[in-house]
């Protein structure tokens, strides 16, 4: 990630986390209290992967850490990390599976015992990026904080005392803040890291190991991810159009550049060949409508910004395949060879079905994507970008086993659910059936974790508090017909795939089966505006419903009241709304005293692309409107930008996402 301006106030970082939290985009990754079950006093902690939030570490990296009834004032079955025997202890919490998260919040209760304590000993909290950032509790009562390339920092703590360590990391802003017992002890750059792979906690493990006994308890890690979704089925390209190496074309707002194909197995390189890409409609990739045939060529795909949750449908009928993510490119015989692998920090899942076709899902942040093949077809490409105010309904707040009949209703997260009549198979929605049932289950049949809603001959009317621009959910469809109603327009079909690409109630509908249509799980998208969404089936499971409200033009900027002037700063409460910016945004800020104010916008390369203000302003709150245009008067391209507010030597910077 390029280095950007890093002078955010502490209160602004708190505001960043608060905004993401109210957007319902936070995901509990670990919640470990070392209690029973699954852990046992006197034994090492249970380790392994599982559903989130996980209640176990993912590894014991060194030594034999043990669960204890108490470690000093930590009396609720903590984990003891002991190096008094000359052998250090360390546990790890793997985060590579959660690479789509951009903000992380870590907390843990910490106690260092004075018994036999060596002043040179340490209890280290290691944040692997993969280069390590550290927070070390030293035996002499000091805390050492280290980020590569940044000035060292330090603080103090009390031994034999329960301490609460809290660390907030924002990868987008390259910023972290460390609190001890609710007081800020450090804030600053996170050293330009673009990912957080693992958090490790342990005493000295390298010789000479010095003596320390420490305990940790009630450890929690939360990740925050912000998403929006879009897709293209190549139906905006002329049927039969042929592209060759060097050609550039656009579909669905995404830019595709045609390049050569690598055919030597292993990392992309060496021998190449060059053929063509052609727009076809033969359904070879097991989809409908247009698709792209790749014959010995690659497509370098530019989304215009960092995206996540990329899904595409494919057919792999011969020759080698290239897949490149964030500059990490591999040549394989078949895409299925990459199932479960990481490329460019992104986790790859491959679902095969039909004669050589399937679906690929990329879990993580994607800046660059390359797809290439020799006898290869590509269809139905989807991806997610940022939605700041995402709404969710995931059923995790409902009781497992709850059942509902027609006429019942309930609330889950941000949505209300009303169970209504189902429509039997037929050409329309006219044959009513009222005897179905819905139940909260956790079978995983919707290809998602934890609770889900099973629909058996019943419809679920999903309502969010506001009209939404898009809605997506995970589903499992295993028999019978399905009902979809959007904005009063009802459709009755055998499978979701039968409705793929249709406009229903003024909304474009897309479905991605991960297996055989009607007998697999998958994902659907409805691109709004959506006031009403109804879904039902005979053997249907749904989960992880997400929706994004439309952009609101604010009458004023809602300033954060937590920001205070510290005597050295003249600017606080810097924020913009709305964000993402689809048409215009308002940048708000507060001045402690009157002065000249300069506001500039910079792209990801650090180039000054717009100047929004250079003027004298009075003390108080202000807002500046921006319509996304640059220095040349033309609207800037979709992407992430940094805006900087300067006054009297103080500088405050924030990020925004501009969308066209």
Image: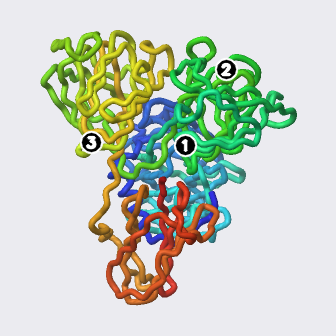
Check the image and name the residue furthest to the left.
407
> Is residue 64 or residue 132 the one in the foreground?
132
Q: Total number of numbered labels?
A: 3
Name the residue carrying label 2: 316
Task: Identify the secondary structure beneath mark 2.
Answer: strand
- Residue 454 visible here: no
Q: Residues within 10 Å of mark 3 (few under 14, many from 20)?
A: some
Residue 194 in the image: state x and y as whole percent.
60, 52
Pointer 3 with pointer 1, Cβ within 8 A: no
Name the residue carrying label 3: 414
Task: Identify the secondary structure beneath mark 3.
Answer: loop
> Is residue 482 or residue 241 the one in the foreground?
241
Going 23% across and 17% down the picture, which residue do you hit? 429
Q: How is the image coloured?
A: rainbow
Name the residue carrying label 1: 99
Q: Is residue 355 above or below residue 461?
A: above
Residue 233 in the image: state x and y as whole percent.
53, 31
Sequence-earlier tag: 3 or 2: 2
User: On the image, which quarter does residue 630 sit in?
Assistant: bottom right
Q: CA distance from mark 3 to mark 1?
A: 25 Å
Q: Residues within 10 Å of mark 2 (few under 14, many from 20)?
A: many
Q: Is residue 512 above or below residue 152?
A: above
Assign the N terminus to one quadrant of the image.
bottom right
């Amino acid at each position: 990630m390029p280095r950007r301006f890093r002078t955010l106030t502490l209160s602004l970082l708190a505001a960043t986390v608060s905004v993401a939290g109210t957007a319902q985009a936070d995901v509990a990754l670990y919640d470990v209290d070392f209690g029973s079950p699954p852990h046992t006093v006197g034994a090492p902690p249970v380790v392994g992967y599982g559903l989130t939030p996980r209640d176990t570490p993912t590894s014991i990296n060194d030594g034999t850490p043990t669960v204890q009834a108490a470690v000093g004032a930590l009396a609720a079955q903590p984990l003891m990390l002991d190096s008094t025997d000359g052998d250090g202890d360390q546990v790890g919490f793997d985060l590579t599976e959660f690479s789509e998260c951009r903000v992380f919040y870590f907390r843990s209760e910490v106690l260092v015992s004075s018994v036999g304590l060596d002043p040179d000993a340490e209890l280290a909290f290691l944040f692997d990026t993969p280069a390590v950032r550290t927070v070390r509790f030293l035996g002499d009562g000091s805390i050492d904080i280290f980020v590569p390339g940044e000035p060292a920092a330090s603080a103090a703590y009390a031994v034999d005392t329960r301490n609460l360590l809290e660390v907030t990391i924002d990868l987008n802003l390259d910023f972290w803040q460390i609190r001890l017992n609710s007081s800020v002890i450090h804030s600053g750059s996170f050293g330009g890291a673009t990912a957080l792979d693992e958090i490790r906690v342990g005493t000295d493990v390298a010789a000479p190991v010095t003596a320390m006994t420490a305990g940790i308890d009630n450890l929690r890690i939360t990740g925050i991810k912000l998403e929006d979704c879009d897709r293209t089925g190549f139906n905006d390209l002329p049927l039969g159009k042929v592209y060759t190496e060097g050609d550039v074309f656009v579909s669905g707002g995404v830019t595709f550049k045609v390049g050569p194909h690598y055919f030597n197995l292993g990392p992309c390189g060496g021998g190449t060949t060059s053929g063509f890409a052609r727009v076809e409609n033969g359904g070879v990739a097991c989809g409908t409508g247009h698709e792209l045939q790749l014959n010995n060529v690659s497509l370098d795909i530019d989304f215009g910004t960092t995206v996540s949750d990329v899904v595409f449908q494919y057919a792999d009928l011969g020759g080698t395949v290239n897949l490149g993510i964030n500059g990490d490119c591999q040549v394989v015989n078949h895409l299925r060879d990459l199932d479960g692998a990481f490329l460019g920090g992104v986790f790859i899942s491959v679902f095969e079905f039909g004669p050589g076709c399937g679906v690929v899902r990329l879990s993580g942040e994607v800046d660059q994507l390359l797809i290439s093949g020799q006898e290869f077809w590509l269809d139905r490409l989807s991806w997610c970008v940022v939605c700041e105010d995402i709404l969710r309904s995931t059923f995790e707040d409902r009781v497992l086993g709850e059942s509902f009949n027609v006429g019942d209703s309930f609330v889950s997260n941000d949505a209300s659910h009303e169970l209504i009549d189902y429509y039997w198979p037929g050409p329309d929605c006219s044959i009513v059936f009222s005897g179905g049932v819905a139940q909260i289950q956790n079978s995983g049949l919707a290809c998602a974790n934890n609770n889900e809603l099973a629909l058996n001959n019943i419809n679920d009317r999903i309502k969010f508090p506001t009209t939404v621009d898009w809605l997506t959910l995970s589903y499992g469809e295993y028999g019978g017909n399905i009902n979809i109603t959007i904005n009063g327009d009802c459709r009755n079909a055998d499978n979701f795939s039968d409705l793929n690409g249709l406009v229903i109630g003024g909304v474009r509908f897309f479905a991605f089966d991960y297996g055989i249509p009607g007998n697999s799980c998958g994902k659907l998208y409805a691109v709004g505006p959506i006031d009403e969404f109804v879904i039902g089936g005979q053997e249907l499971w749904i989960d992880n419903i997400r929706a994004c409200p439309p952009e609101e033009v604010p009458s004023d900027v809602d300033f954060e009241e937590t920001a205070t002037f510290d005597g050295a700063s003249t600017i606080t409460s810097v924020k913009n709304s709305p964000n993402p910016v689809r048409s215009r945004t308002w940048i708000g800020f507060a001045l402690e005293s009157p002065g000249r104010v300069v506001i500039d916008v910079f792209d990801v390369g650090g180039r000054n692309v717009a100047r929004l203000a250079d003027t004298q302003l009075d003390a108080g709150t202000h807002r500046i409107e921006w319509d996304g245009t640059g220095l040349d008067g033309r609207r800037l391209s979709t992407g992430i930008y940094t805006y900087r507010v300067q006054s009297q030597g103080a500088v405050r910077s924030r990020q925004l996402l501009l969308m066209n």
